[in-house]
Image: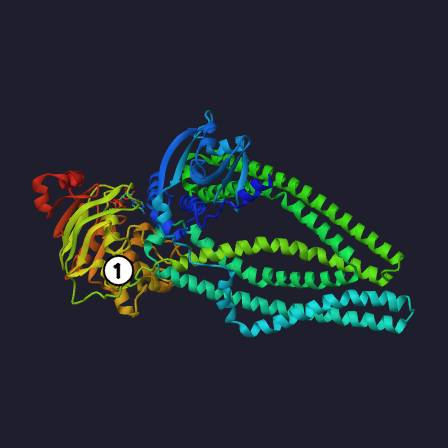
Amino acid sequence: MLKDFIRRRKYPFYKQPDAMDCGPVCLKMVARYHGKNFSMQHLRKLCKIGKQGTTMLDLIDAAENIGFKTMAAELEYNKLHRLPMPCIVHWQKEHYVVVYEVNNESVYLADPALNSKIKLDTAAFLSGWNINDDTQIGRVLLLEATRSFHEMDSKPEHKTSLWNLIPYLKLHRKGWFPIAVSLALASGFSLVIPLLTQMIVDKGIQGKNTNLLLLICLGQLMLFSGRMLMDFVRGRLLFRIGARTSITMLKDFLAKLMKLPFSFFDNRQAGDNMQRVNDNQRIEEFLTNSLINFILSAITLIVLGGVLLHYNWQIFLLFIVGAGISVIWSNSFQQKRKMIDQKKFKVLSANQQLLLEIFYAMQEIKLTGSEEEKKQLWEGLQDQSFDLKLEALQLDQRMQGVGAFINEVKNVLITYAAAMLVIHDQVTLGGMLAITYICGQLNAPVNQLVEFSRVSQNAAFSLLRIDEVQQETEEDFGVDEELNEDGPVDIVLDQISFQYGGKHSAQVLKNVSLKIPAGKVTAIVGTSGSGKTTLIKLLLKFYASSAGSIKIGKQKIEAINARSWRKYCGVVMQDGYVFMDTIANNIFAGAEVKDFNRLHEAAKMANMHAFFLKMPFGYETVVGRDGFGLSEGQKQRLLIARMIYRNPDYVFLDEATNSLDAQNELSIVNNLNTFFQGKTVLIVAHRLSTVKNADQIVVLQQGEIKEVGTHQQLLQIKGHYYHLIKNQLELGQ
Ligand SMILES: Nc1ncnc2c1ncn2[C@@H]1O[C@H](COP(=O)(O)OP(=O)(O)OP(=O)(O)O)[C@@H](O)[C@H]1O
């Protein structure tokens, strides 16, 4: 039994840093079980993790890449115990967990979304594993470590622990000295107070010495005042150190984020990055609160524990046994608490998701009349949440009630034992009071030490998550070449292929070869989803192609520093963003020189000058998400003005005029045609009016180039282009 317990404790467990990391973390746990340590960064890359996480096929590829022989199967529950363990199972149709052991009543599993391993009974396991409710069948990925796995070198994680905070703390050396002094004095106080208590009784009361009594009380008063003053000063110092450390860390974090490639943000949910900002706050809380509480508790325990031992070793032992039983009692509830936490977490996130959807989709809800449906969904979640809260409360009450009873029994026993010692003249009455005072003072530190182990684990995990971002390769790491700029040059794509995910994901671009000539306008047309935006993103170095090469003049795009390249590009994307800032600053965005004459010119070309002048504060009016509202068409024209102000050599427009009315479009397209003179331009558009004057038109269908030519040439061959724009021709555009 004990052997089983020890063995199970050794099963590796890792928590997933990001919402979509369950696949690679499961692989990490299984590899660790077999003795190899692979970093999350490495496994994430192998799993080709995207916003939707990893597919079973990509997980298999990744496992085979590190030397596992794999077999994926759909299997009946009663066969699970015969499989080689550990294995990975598909969980609740959207998640992966590791199963370490299966026996008659229970399944031991490691769910990376939780804080530690859990044991589930068969019914609970089946409810998460079953493919559907009527069967006892689920999906499993079996992994066998082969020779090549054992011969492979580990690629361990960059080492992170709470010690990594030391360089940050060193920045505030001066503040730590007074804190250390205040802690030393605090420990002195905790030593002196029980001794003073004893003196009051033994010397003051029993010796009927009123002067001494007064003196001790005065001394006690001064000690308390001193302690309060020190707590006050320490609180301030800690706040400064914690807040400054957190700001420095946050600054480093944001500086790093800005240097990361676009794919980093594309592959993660925004919530994961926000979570990392919260992680910084958690570390601040750890430094300013938990760490000092821990040190204080440890000092109090050592000093008061020593004094108690000095008074009487039997009472000391009684205290240790009592405290030990109470800690074991609270720990015995861990498993149940974890399971309730898991359910609570799910309900909470579903609740948050639903509320967000209700706020964002209010228009659709009203239009479709689904108010009642959404309300019922929400109420259902509230009922579940209520049941879980009640369950948690009952558990807590049982735990705390019995815990308090154990504590009281311990206190009564100690009082009884101390009283017996007084009766047998082994301890004075003052000594007895000092002992009960000490035992009372020791309860809180014991609980705080237990709590600290949990808080420090969370802080270490937060630090790991922040450090993971610090370890990511920067967009321009080792890429120093500037663009050789003597005016625009040709951009040449040679056999470009691209997939967003792993090798099993869809090919978005297939062998695309294309010359975008310097100083000319190239238009790309094609049905929705044919890869037009993706092509622009490759040209802007947001992604690297899976195969083939892109050259800007004679330089390979991958050799050119991305920031240097983008300096020469003016882009209006389909989902371009208007910052919450003034109109002027929105147009100046990223510009080194702020020239108001040029700003007005750009706005005029985008047909927005007159409109901006009519705004409440003209060009100083704040627009954007929470600013003054702009229509889609006005937003697009502002983005066009921004692009014009940059006066780039290379222009990329992705459906930049699709929200404009015919009148505005005509006039802006005319202005742009003048602006395009001498620039290399790539336009993605559906509207005939935007593309027909292009020097060359490229037709992209399902990631492949089908036709290239001028409007007239393509009309004549009556192929893909003709069919794409036929309706617009008939409409006479
Ligand atoms: N970040 C992404 N991750 C995974 N797949 C993506 C991503 N972005 C686009 N895709 C997929 O790539 C394919 C091409 O998308 P893309 O946006 O390039 O098409 P498009 O031709 O610009 O379409 P539209 O005319 O509708 O804007 C689509 O099937 C889309 O689902």
Ligand 1 within 8 Å, label 1 CB: no
Q: In front: 439, or 146?
A: 146
Query: Residue 371: x percent and y percent?
Result: 47, 36
Q: Please name the residue that numbered disc 1 is placed on.
A: 643
Which quadrant would the C terminus be assigned to in this image?
top left
Q: Residue at x 56, y 36 (%)?
A: 384
Q: Amino acid at mark 1?
A: Met
Q: Residue 697's x, y, as percent? A: 14, 48
Query: Furthest-top residue in view?
Result: 134
Residue 521 or residue 308, whichever sits in front:
308
> Could you say where residue 91 lies in the image, as x and y percent from the top left?
45, 37
Say whether residue 127 is left or right of residue 692.
Answer: right
Image quadrant in which you'd find residue 105: top right
Depth order, front residue of 449/255: 449
Q: Quadrant of residue 33?
A: top left
The reply to whether residue 47 is in sight is no
**Is 390 positioned to the left or the right of 159 in the image?**
right
Q: Secondary structure at mark 1?
A: helix
All told, the count of numbered labels is 1
> Taking 76 as reference, is 530 above or below it?
below
- Locate ligand 1 by image quadrant: top left
Q: Is residue 354 visible?
A: yes
How is the protein colored in the picture? Answer: rainbow
Q: In what quadrant of the picture does the N terminus appear?
A: top right
